[in-house]
Amino acid sequence: MGAGAEPFRKLSLLDEEPVSILGGTLDWVPVRRRLGIGAFGTNAYRAEHAGDIVIEDHVESPGQEEMYVVLEGAVRFTIDGAETDAGAGEVVFLPDPEIRRAGAALEDGTVVLAVGGWRDQPYHSLPWEPIFLAQESMRRGDWAAAAEILEREAGEHIDVGFVQFRLACCHVQAGEHDRALDELRRALELTPGLRSKAEGEPLLEPLRGRF
C-alpha cells in the first residue's frame, strides 16, 4: 500500500444516498464507483415497498456471471420464467449470462447486493453506469445537468455509441441542436444498429430528417 493510501473504505448499503433510476421506481447504490472498486462489479438496489422492482428485468448482455445477495427483506426472483423466493441471508447465483432474470420485493425495505464479473477476463466498468447516474436529472427534465453528468462520469466510455446517443438526447432537449446532431451522428457511426431506435425516439424529434 502506497504512502498516504486509505487502508479501507466503507459505506452503509442501508443508509447510503441512492440514485433514483427506472423512472424513479428503484433506488440504486453505485457501490463499485463510490468505493473505487476495480476488481469486480458490485451494486446495491433498494425497494421501498413490497411489490416494487428490486432487480430490473434483463439479461447480462456483457456476458457476466452474477450473484444476488438479499440483505434485508425478501425477493421473488423470476429466472428463465420460473419463480423462486429468497429471504435475508440467501444468495441466488446465475452462471449463465443469457438467462433472463428479474426480482420484485416481497417486503418493504428490501435490499439486494449484486456482484458480477467474467470468468475468463479481468473486470472492466460498463457504460450503463454513467447513464444510470444521469437518469434522475433526465426524469426531472434538467437536460443540461444530465448531459454534464454523462460527460463527467463516462470516462473511457465517452465514445460508446449508446452514451453518445444519450448525450444527443440530453443536448437536443437542452436546445443545443447542432451539438446533439454531431453526437447522434457519432453514435450511429459507432453503433449502426441504433438507427431504428433513433428514428423512434421522441426526445430526438427536433432532429428528425437531419440524420
Image: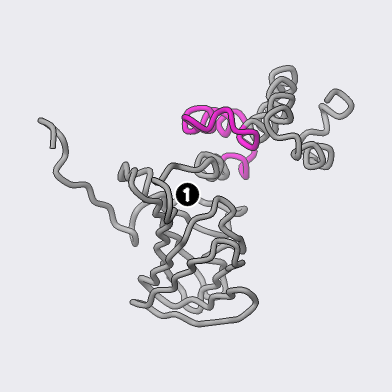
Q: In this view, which residue lies farthest toward the left? A: 3
Q: Is residue 147 above or below residue 82?
A: above
- Magenta-colored span: 137-163
Q: Name the side, left or right, on which 191 lies relative to 91.
A: right
Looking at the rendering, in which quadrant would you find the C terminus?
top right
Horizontal side, residue 96 vs residue 6: left or right: right
Q: In the current view of this chain or complex, which residue is farthest to the top? A: 178
Give yes or no for residue 151 being in the magenta stretch.
yes
Residue located 55% across and 31% down the image: 145
Residue 114 x %, y %? 42, 61
- Residue 1 position (above or below residue 148): below
Residue under numbered circle 1: 19
Circle 1: is it few (<14), some (14-19), or many (20+) Cα within 10 Å? some
**Location of residue 40 with respect to 143 vertically, above or below:** below
Q: Amino acid at mark 1?
A: Val
Residue beneath the point at 41% across and 55% down: 43
Identify the colour scheme used: one colour
Image quadrant where residue 35 sits:
top left
* Spot occupied by residue 163 in the image (x, y as percentages of width and height): 61, 35
Position of residue 172 measured from the top left corner of the image (x, y, whole percent) = 72, 27
Among all residues in the image, which is located at the extreme front?
120
Q: Quadrant of the N terminus?
A: top left
From the image, give the main secondary structure of the stretch colored magenta.
helix
In this view, the residue in front, 98 or 151, is 98
Q: Secondary structure at mark 1?
A: strand
Residue 141 part of the magenta segment: yes
